[in-house]
Image (spheres, helix red, strand yellow):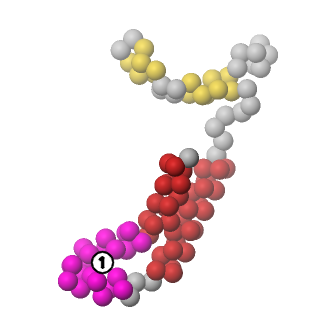
């Protein structure tokens, strides 16, 4: 649960972090304080909210599998890694 909260907070702060990094890289540390004081924090927050909503909508609209299907995680077999995949339930396949 804490991972989800941290990820969403990071999405909200990402535009601000990029802006601050850009200011420090272009202006330098001497002039950065005044630039950061004049930063458009409201617009950076709005951009973070839009980014968070977009990411949540994209991940919410993609489906993992159908009911009756189970995720088979990657396994190490015979010296090779077999990638993860969605495995159909044998009983529900009807065949």
Residue 26's spot in the image, x, y percent?
Answer: 25, 78
**Main structural element of the magenta stretch: helix, strand or loop?**
helix
Q: Residue furthest front?
A: 2
Q: Dot 1 corresponds to which residue?
A: 23
Q: Residue sitting at 48 percent across and 25 percent down?
A: 74
* Vertical arrangement, residue 18 with respect to residue 84, above or below: below
Q: Residue sitting at 64 percent across and 26 percent down?
A: 70
Task: Give residue 18's quadrant in the image.
Answer: bottom left
Q: Which residues are magenta?
A: 16-37
Which corner quadrant holds the C terminus? top right
88 sits left or right of 3 in the view: right
Residue 86 versus residue 4: which sits nearer the camera? 4
Residue 88's spot in the image, x, y percent?
Answer: 68, 22
Task: Give residue 69's quadrant in the image.
Answer: top right
* Vertical arrangement, residue 72 with respect to residue 27, above or below: above
Residue 95 versus residue 46: which sits nearer the camera? 46
Residue 28's spot in the image, x, y percent?
Answer: 21, 79
Answer whether residue 48 is magenta in the image: no
* Vertical arrangement, residue 64 with respect to residue 84, above or below: below
Answer whether residue 23 is magenta in the image: yes
């Amino acid at each position: 649960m804490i991972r989800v909260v941290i990820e969403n907070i990071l999405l909200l702060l990402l535009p601000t972090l990029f802006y601050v990094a850009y200011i420090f890289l272009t202006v330098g540390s001497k002039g950065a304080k005044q630039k950061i004081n004049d930063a458009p924090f409201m617009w950076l927050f709005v951009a973070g909210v839009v980014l968070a909503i977009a990411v949540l909508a994209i991940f919410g609209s993609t489906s993992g599998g159908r009911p009756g299907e189970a995720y088979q995680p990657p396994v190490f077999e015979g010296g090779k890694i077999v990638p993860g995949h969605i495995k159909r339930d044998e009983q529900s396949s009807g065949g």
